[in-house]
DNA sequence: AAACCCGATTGACTCAGGTCAAATTTGGCA
DNA sequence: TGCCAAATTTGACCTGAGTCAATCGGGTTT
């Protein structure tokens, strides 16, 4: 699958009319800088299931996700997988300025991203401390999320994991598509299981149980929160 | 307990003869800067079990750990605890430049740290991009460790967790006290359990089992690796 | 040196979530 | 429309780790 269907568009795109501009890394750039920045990135596409980069790769590119969803994961030698996060439009990937990526990333569905070569990007940052500061902020925010996820993985029950996941995912979608009680789930049950440290069967059973209890409704391509307060209660407990 | 026995030494200490200087944040500073930096920090002490800061506190200080060990953790409303990491000399704590700490930190045994007030520290960084870069590197390294720990919490068995923990902890001690097959464990069994997402009983039983099998030996204040290769095998599997 | 405390260990039993094996549903495509 | 392959759900059973309840030490106090 790897890099098989990747396409690179040679023609111009403009940062100024980029959908994710206001919350991505580039939010910290002024109009003049943006012009220069524009020439550093090229727009790339990935097809469903394609691997964008692998954990053992040394970092040669950074990506700014524009459209679609990606799963970020690590594998154990025997094939067990832990998904360490999902990336959404506006997310910046590959912050390892040196060394290797320490996780792999696949496209879930079609993905568009803005790709930057490591060296010119590094040079660009060099004399722009505000951009570095922005990247630092993003790293620290992710670190906070990572710690929250450790609590979930280490100390929460299956029900709590599912409820917390639904609310967290819904919250992440708000800036992209506004508030809603219907949570689209583009990732598979297996992906959810590997994100929450469960098996696919437990994920499925938990959804069914919550539906039987009238807490959620399993809809096509997602979950509808029938009783958001009860979901919240499950997640807090 | 909180801040009860804290002492602040008004008299001078010098960064130049600081034990952790070579691997702490300050490693990125030149001699002249170091002089200025010296005036920003004050040396503080914490007694066993004392809380240095809590997750809900808004960040007003950063700490550079000089001596001792700290546990960094998050609590669920019902009291369940997840330890998200242990801090050792040279570690920089409280990287949230704005907002609140998102974890709590207690001293395990007596601790000495270098404390910086947020505002002057922020000002100092402002026109020193190399320091910001250093902090960024540290954040990204921690992010990598956090992801590794997610894999452990979500996908590894009790035996694997214990083995991985022993090797990881031993590796972290190398720069501080050199390589050794005897791993000191200053933290309690409960701390280890809360770090690995286990119960204290499982931690205890697993240590006993490994000792029965001749893989480790439980010594006063730590664990001696009798058969490091076997521990390694357990951690890799 | 007896009494006490507190962390650690051990034992017996339980159960949440995993495993294995069918159904069943869904989606793609000829 | 109908067929195949993959994803999801469901059921029956099992087990790794949790729970609950004694002990066991080692260290400190009196």
Image: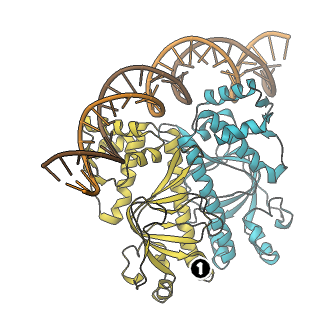
Chain colours: A yellow, B cyan, C orange, D brown
On screen, residue B10 above or below A131: above
In depth, the one of B39 and C12 nearer the eye is: C12
Which quadrant is the N terminus of chain B positioned in?
top right
Residue B198 lies in quadrant: top right
In the orientation shown, which residue stands out farthest toward the bottom?
A32
Left or right of residue C5: residue A53: left
Residue B181: x %, y % from top left: 82, 40
The answer to whether residue B100 is seen in the rendering is no
Which quadrant is the C terminus of chain B positioned in?
top right
In depth, the one of D2 and B160 nearer the eye is: D2
Residue A90: x %, y % from top left: 43, 69
Query: Helix, strand or loop at disc 1?
Result: helix
Task: Tell me the chain of label 1.
Answer: A
Residue C18: x %, y % from top left: 48, 33
In depth, the one of B218 and B15 nearer the eye is: B218
On screen, residue A108 above or below B184: below
Q: What residue would you read off at disc 1? A: A125
Callout 1 crowding tier (Cα within 10 Å): few <14, some 14–19, many ≥20? some
Residue B32: x %, y % from top left: 81, 78
On screen, residue B10 above or below D12: below
Task: Residue at 84% x, 65% y: name it.
Answer: B14
Left or right of residue A77: residue B69: right
Residue A22 lies in quadrant: bottom left
In depth, the one of A73 and B75 nearer the eye is: A73
Task: Residue at 82% x, 75% y: name it.
Answer: B31
Total count of labels:
1
Task: Residue at 30% x, 64% y: name it.
Answer: A177
The answer to whether residue B181 is seen in the rendering is yes
């Amino acid at each position: 699958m790897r890099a098989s269907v990747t396409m690179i568009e040679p023609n111009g795109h403009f940062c100024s009319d980029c959908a994710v501009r206001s919350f991505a890394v580039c939010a910290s750039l002024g109009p003049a800088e943006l012009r220069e920045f524009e020439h550093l990135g090229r727009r790339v596409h990935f097809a469903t299931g394609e691997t964008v980069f692998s954990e053992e790769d040394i970092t040669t590119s950074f990506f700014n996700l524009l459209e679609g969803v990606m799963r970020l994961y690590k594998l154990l030698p025997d094939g067990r997988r832990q998904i360490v996060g999902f990336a959404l439009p506006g997310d910046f990937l590959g912050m390892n300025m040196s060394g290797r990526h320490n996780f792999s990333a696949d496209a879930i569905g079609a993905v568009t991203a803005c790709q930057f070569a490591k060296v010119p990007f590094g040079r660009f940052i060099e004399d722009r401390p505000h951009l570095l500061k922005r990247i630092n902020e993003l790293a620290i925010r992710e670190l906070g999320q990572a710690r929250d996820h450790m609590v979930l993985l280490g100390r929460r029950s299956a029900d709590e994991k599912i409820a917390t996941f639904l609310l967290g995912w819904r919250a992440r979608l708000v800036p992209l598509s506004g508030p809603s009680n219907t949570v689209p789930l583009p990732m598979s049950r297996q992906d959810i299981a590997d994100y929450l440290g469960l098996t696919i069967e437990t994920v499925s059973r938990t959804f069914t149980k919550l539906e039987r209890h009238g807490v959620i409704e399993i809809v096509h391509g997602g979950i509808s929160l029938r009783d958001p307060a009860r979901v919240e209660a499950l997640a807090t407990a």
